[in-house]
Structure formats: structure tokens, C-alpha cells
Image (cartoon, rainbow, N blue to C red):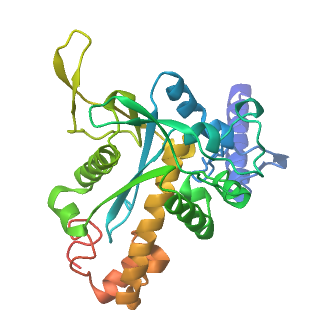
């Protein structure tokens, strides 16, 4: 037999043998171990938790640039939910409490955190004409236990329900320090204009209400919104320039992706929005116990979808325009 033909057959037999070995044992080829290359899955839940000081870095920078009032805003109950309202919260730490209430270094205060962190102090209060007046404020006391709780502030998803509630209660008990504004859009409103527009309108309403209620001077306000988009703000303030001419001034607003995990005031807003919405879902759970709203919080997970198949959707509670709800 021709030598070339023999060689050709030998090559074919070797190929067939390799295929058989591979099928019978995917991790070995003819007794030799092979390394299977598999793509690594990215962890969606792995979030880097920043320190207390790191969360305050951006706000410190903005204060140094002359922005006295930094507002953080975040929402709860967005596109991932198929029931309940979308809740937006905005929060601003008022001056001068920012420097004394949240010391970030030993040089910023001689007091220890175990002492009262905020006491009588002079602060600049905006008057109706936008000018500052110096006034002595009543004593505000923040205990060590409260400071310990507030130092744990972070993205609400990284905290327990108890931690979120404790932080929210402290903020409510100190309105002289924390300016808070909350806006909501109902399922009917979401269905009417879609979830994205509903969120943006609620963001704008929450931010503008906070600024107007506290009569904050627009040129000293900087607003940070969690996410990729910031709302269109309609509020404006009449100002007079040095040359005597009058004009309208709007305050700055920017989006910040993962702001709730990187900026202190946005993290505070995320906690407020989450607590308020959880309360709303708890109320719905008490009204409609079969739907278990307190367990899935209105998210479109498997349990909730199965309940929709079984019980049907609730008008005024479920978002009827959402794909998972349509026709239920």
C-alpha cells in the first residue's frame, strides 16, 4: 500500500479518536486534562461601599466653590415595579450645620463625636430679597447615638429596614438640619404619561418645593439627581446684577450615576424615598393581604406575576400599562 495513503488513514483515525474522547469526557482528551475556558459572570449586587468621609467629598468640593446648599435626590419604585407609586425624595443639609454636624477631620472641630455636635451658632439666613442676614439659631443637639447611626448612611439597598427607619426618624426629628421634600406619582399618573416622565416630574417637583419652602438663593443651590438623567426645572428667581439690571436665575442640577452610593445627600434621599414607599406598600398589603405587597414591594418578580395570574390586577394599584400587567 502506498505510504501516503497509510499516513492519510492514520491522520483520520487520530481525528476520530480525539472526537470520541472529547464527547465521552469533556474535561479530558485521551487521558490528558484540558482547561475549559468559561466566561466569568459579573456580579450585579457587588457594590463598593464608601467610607463616611468619601461620601462627603463631592459636597465638600461644592461648598468650597460657593454652593451653600447641596440637594440630593433619588427615587424608589421605578421601572422595576409593576404596582404602587413612584416616590421621589430630596434632602439638603442646611448651613452652618454641615460643618459642625458632620465633621470629616480632626481639624474641622475640637469636639469629639461623643459630645454634642451642634450648638448655638451664627448662620447666614437668606432673606426674601436674596440677601444674607446673620442670626443666632436656637441650640440643636445631636447625640452620640444619633451620630453613630448617621455615620452609617449609604445607598439604601445596602442597609436593613431597621437602619433605614432609624436614619429617617433622626432626620425628621431635626428639621433645622435636614431639609426634606417628598413627591409621588400614582399608578394612574404613571399609566397616563409613562414611568420615565412621571419620575422626572416628581424629581422636579421635589427639588423645586424644597428650594421654595426654604427660600434658598438660587446662585448657592446645586442639585444632584441619582441616575443618567436630570429633570427639567421650571423654577427661576429674579436677581439684580451689579450694574443694576434684573434677570432670571435658575439653579444648577446634574445627574449622577450611582449617586446614592457615592454622595451623602443622595444616599439620604434614597433612604427617605425607600422608607416612604415601603410604608405605602405596607398599607396596600393590609388592604389586599392576598397580594403580599409587603413581601415583593410591587416589583415584577416571579411571586408577584404568579399572583397576578391567579387573582388579577387591581385598578389604581397596579400599573395597567406595564407589559406584565396588561390583560390581567
Q: Residue at x 37, y 76 (%)?
A: 305
Q: Residue at x 22, y 76 (%)?
A: 316
- Tell me: residue 49, above or below residue 192: above
Instruction: Residue 198: name its quadrant.
Output: bottom left
- Tell me: residue 324, above or below residue 72: below
> Looking at the rendering, in which quadrant would you find the N terminus?
top right
Left or right placement of residue 162 versus residue 282 in this view: right
Viewer-side residue, 303 vs 224 = 224
Viewer-side residue, 37 vs 312 = 312
- Tell me: residue 166, above or below residue 261: below
Q: Looking at this rendering, what residue extends furthest in the top direction?
A: 243
Q: Looking at this rendering, what residue extends furthest in the right direction?
A: 31
- Tell me: residue 124, above or below residue 156: above
- From this viewpoint, is residue 258 visible? no
Number of callouts: 0
Viewer-side residue, 11 vs 83 = 83
> Looking at the rendering, in which quadrant would you find the C terminus?
bottom left
Q: Position of residue 30 (x, y in %)?
A: 80, 48
Q: Residue at x 23, y 50 (%)?
A: 197
Q: Position of residue 143 (x, y in %)?
A: 69, 58
- From this viewpoint, is residue 137 visible? yes
Left or right placement of residue 323 versus residue 223 in this view: left
Q: Residue at x 51, y 45 (%)?
A: 137
Q: Position of residue 233 (x, y in %)?
A: 24, 39
Left or right placement of residue 97 versus residue 219 in this view: right
Viewer-side residue, 217 vs 326 = 217
Q: Position of residue 50 (x, y in %)?
A: 66, 42
Amino acid at each position: 500500500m502506498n505510504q501516503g495513503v497509510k499516513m492519510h488513514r492514520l491522520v483520520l483515525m487520530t481525528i476520530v479518536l480525539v472526537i470520541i474522547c472529547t464527547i465521552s469526557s469533556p474535561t479530558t482528551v485521551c487521558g490528558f486534562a484540558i482547561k475549559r475556558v468559561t466566561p466569568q459572570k459579573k456580579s450585579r449586587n457587588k457594590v463598593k461601599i464608601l467610607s463616611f468621609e468619601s461620601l462627603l467629598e463631592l459636597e465638600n468640593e461644592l461648598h468650597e466653590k460657593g454652593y451653600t446648599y447641596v440637594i440630593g435626590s433619588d427615587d424608589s419604585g421605578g421601572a422595576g415595579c409593576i404596582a404602587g407609586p413612584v416616590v421621589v425624595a430630596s434632602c439638603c443639609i442646611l448651613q452652618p450645620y454641615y460643618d459642625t454636624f458632620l465633621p470629616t477631620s480632626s481639624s474641622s472641630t475640637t469636639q469629639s463625636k461623643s459630645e454634642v455636635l451642634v450648638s448655638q451658632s451664627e448662620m447666614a439666613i437668606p432673606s426674601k430679597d436674596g440677601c444674607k442676614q446673620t442670626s443666632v439659631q436656637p441650640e440643636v443637639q445631636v447625640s452620640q447615638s444619633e451620630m453613630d447611626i448617621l455615620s452609617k448612611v449609604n445607598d439604601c439597598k445596602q442597609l436593613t429596614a431597621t437602619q433605614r427607619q432609624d436614619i429617617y426618624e433622626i432626620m425628621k426629628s431635626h428639621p433645622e438640619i435636614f431639609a426634606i421634600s417628598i413627591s409621588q406619582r400614582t399608578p394612574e399618573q404613571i399609566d397616563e404619561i409613562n414611568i420615565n416622565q412621571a419620575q422626572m416630574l416628581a424629581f422636579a417637583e421635589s427639588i423645586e418645593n424644597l428650594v421654595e419652602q426654604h427660600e434658598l438663593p438660587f446662585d448657592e443651590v446645586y442639585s444632584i439627581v441619582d441616575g443618567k438623567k436630570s429633570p427639567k426645572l421650571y423654577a427661576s428667581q429674579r436677581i439684580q446684577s451689579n450694574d443694576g439690571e434684573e434677570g432670571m436665575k435658575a439653579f444648577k442640577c446634574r445627574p449622577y450615576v450611582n449617586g446614592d452610593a457615592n454622595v451623602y445627600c443622595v444616599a439620604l434621599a434614597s433612604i427617605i424615598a425607600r422608607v416612604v414607599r415601603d410604608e405605602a406598600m405596607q398599607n396596600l398589603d393590609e388592604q389586599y393581604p392576598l397580594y403580599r405587597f409587603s413581601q415583593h414591594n410591587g416589583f415584577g418578580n416571579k411571586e408577584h406575576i404568579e399572583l397576578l395570574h391567579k387573582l388579577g390586577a387591581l385598578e389604581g394599584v397596579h400599573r395597567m400599562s406595564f407589559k406584565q400587567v396588561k390583560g390581567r
